[in-house]
Image (tube, rainbow, N blue to C red):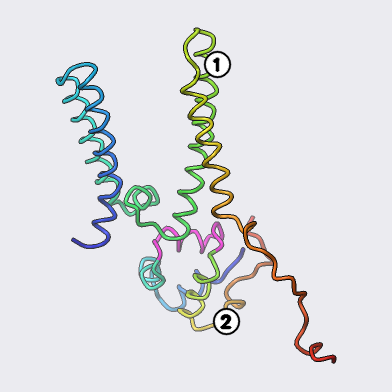
Amino acid sequence: MRNRVRELRAERGVSQAELAVSLGVSRQTVISIENGRYAPSLPLAFRIARFFAMPVEQLFDPEEEVG
Amino acid sequence: MTLSKRRRLRTPAVAVLAGTTFAVAVGISQGWWTALASEAIALAWAASLYRIGGKDSDIGAAVGAQGDERQELVKLRAARLCLAVVLVAIVGGCLIAAATKNPIWPFQAIAILIGIAYFYGLWLYGTDREEADGTAYEPEDHRDGF
């Protein structure tokens, strides 16, 4: 599943470690989500959306699979 | 002591407990010097588990018992692989025991236990026990005869 987490994080100047702490997950999980290797659970997806203050559907694109 | 430190101690504590139990069994059958050596290995193993549990990695999170949802999934997948290897080892051990005319019942007992645990897990974590409520989905605007 493609997402805009890396792009939005870079825009806001937040490090992966800082985002991980804010979301209550590990840095490795943030890396996996950004690379599209891991599709987060609904609660985590909503936490990410709340962090970036945007709807979850603008963050994640279920139609596109990362190759 | 913080919660994370207590969690980090969980796996090493289990290792010490299992190692000590094994050392006692070894002590009874082979003498207490062998038991002491066995206990020393268990303590060293527990110490390395504690060290690994503090690392900022998936392995560290798994050993330190403090992973997030993805790391829990990684642990489940690792456990599934581990179980597959155990099953192969049981079949292999059973075949070797049968070929060398040794008792095969310990292998059978472990296989039966694993089978029971598997079906218990399906029952426990599955939703088959929950009965359907018998009502069909009806959009709100179709209710009350509309």
Nearest the eye: B121 or B132: B132
Label 2: few (<14), some (14–19) or many (≥20) C-alpha neighbours in 10 Å: few
- Residue where numbered disc 1 is placed: B95
Looking at the image, residue A59 sits to the left or right of residue B24; the answer is right
Residue A32 magenta-drawn?
A: yes
Element assignment for label 2: loop
Q: Quadrant for the N terminus of chain B, please.
A: bottom left
Give the image location of residue B63, x and y in percent.
34, 47
Residue A37 placement: quadrant: bottom right
Between disc 2 and disc 1, the foreground one is 1
Task: Kindly identify the residue that appears in the image at 22 percent across and 62 percent down.
Answer: B2
Label 1 environment density (alpha carbons within 10 Å; few <14, some 14–19, many ≥20)? some
Position of B22 compared to B94: left or right?
left
Identify the amino acid type marked 2. Pro
Q: Circle 1 — which element?
A: helix
**Which chain does tag 1 point to?**
B
- Between B133 and A1, which is closer to the camera in this rendering? B133
Q: Residue furthest right?
A: B146
Q: Position of residue B8 (x, y in %)?
A: 27, 52
Query: Total of numbered circles in the picture?
Result: 2
- Disc 2 + disc 1, Cβ < 8 Å: no
Chain identifier of the residue bearing label 2 in the image: A
- Residue at image point 38% right, 50% down: B62
Segment colored magenta: A25-39
Q: Is residue B86 above or below residue A32?
A: above
**Amino acid at circle 1:** Leu
Q: Is residue A6 magenta?
A: no
- As drawn, is B140 to the left or to the right of B26? right
Residue that mark 2 sits on:
A55
